[in-house]
């Protein structure tokens, strides 16, 4: 299972990378705006900085919604660094763009996936990744994990190489459940990732080991 971090914050990316378990980064226009990055030049420079920190796949999202605009943006983004993956929304024009980019050898991440049918179309078009948004489904009282399970079943039925990238992660159980189901990748904010580290019995056990060591080595 690959671990991506879902942020455009360079400090958070560096912290996750320092753990030694980070495989990539995902961003989106909202995450870029959150860290105050705006304007085409600044956005492209920021992607370059992220790609310098993380050698694995870095998803950079297009903002065009028409085929020609998406292709033009995708080619510009892909030229920034060899590890850029172009994030394309799951809309009709996006599907055509994914097909085109796949044939050109440009990796894509089909984003805003909320149904198994959308994932199937993206896989059929040759997307490298599909990003089902678990948390946003949970937010509207729909089981986000069931979507991951449905996509896993469908992709396995036909041997689609498209990787399932579980996104919109809100808490550590989303990561555990994604791993149980067999999502290929999880992209998470830093907090749920770090939460995986914690267990009170680990803290208690470590305190006891150190206490016993100190008693025996006075
Ligand atoms: O990777 C997609 C993710 O950024 C969406 O997360 O928390 O905005 O639903 P969220």
Image (tube, rainbow, N blue to C red):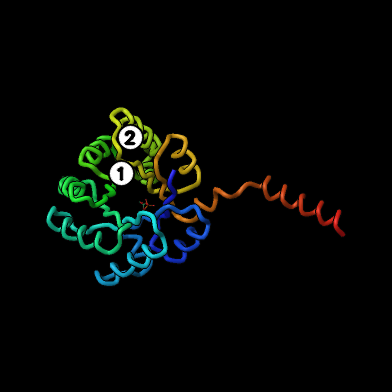
The label on residue 151 is 2
Residue at the image position 33 percent from the left and 43 percent from the top: 132
Residue at disc 1, secondary structure: strand
Q: Can residue 125 be seen in the rendering of this structure?
A: yes
Nearer to us in this view, 114 or 129? 129
The label on residue 130 is 1
**In x, y percent, where is residue 203?**
68, 50
Q: Is residue 139 left or right of residue 103?
A: right
Quadrant of the drawing holding the N terminus: top left
Report how far apart the C-alphas of labels 1 and 2 lie in the structure: 9 Å
**In x, y percent, where is residue 59?**
32, 55
**Mark 1–mark 2 CB contact (< 8 Å):** yes
Q: Is residue 100 left or right of residue 22?
A: left
Q: Dot 1: few (<14), some (14–19), or many (≥20) neighbours within 10 Å?
A: many
Which residue is outermost to the left?
68
Quadrant of the drawing holding the C terminus: bottom right
């Amino acid at each position: 299972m690959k671990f991506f971090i879902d942020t455009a914050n360079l400090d958070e990316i560096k912290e996750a990378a320092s753990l030694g378990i980070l495989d990539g980064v995902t961003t989106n226009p909202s995450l870029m705006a959150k860290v105050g990055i705006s304007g085409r030049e600044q956005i492209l420079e920021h992607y370059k900085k992220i790609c310098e920190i993380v050698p694995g796949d870095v998803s950079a999202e297009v903002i065009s919604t028409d085929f020609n605009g998406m292709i033009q943006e995708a080619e510009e983004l892909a030229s920034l660094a060899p590890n850029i993956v172009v994030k394309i929304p799951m809309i009709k024009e996006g599907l055509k763009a994914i097909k085109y980019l796949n044939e050109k050898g440009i990796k894509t991440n089909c984003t805003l996936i909320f149904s198994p049918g959308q994932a199937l179309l993206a896989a059929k078009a040759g997307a490298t990744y599909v990003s089902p948004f678990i948390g946003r489904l949970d937010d509207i009282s729909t089981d986000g994990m069931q979507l991951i399970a449905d996509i896993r079943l469908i992709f396995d039925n036909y041997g689609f190489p498209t990787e399932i990238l579980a996104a919109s992660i809100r808490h550590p159980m989303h990561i555990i459940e994604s791993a149980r189901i067999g999502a290929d990748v999880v992209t998470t904010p830093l907090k749920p990732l770090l939460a995986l580290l914690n267990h009170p019995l680990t803290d208690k056990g470590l305190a006891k080991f150190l206490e016993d060591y100190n008693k025996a080595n006075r």
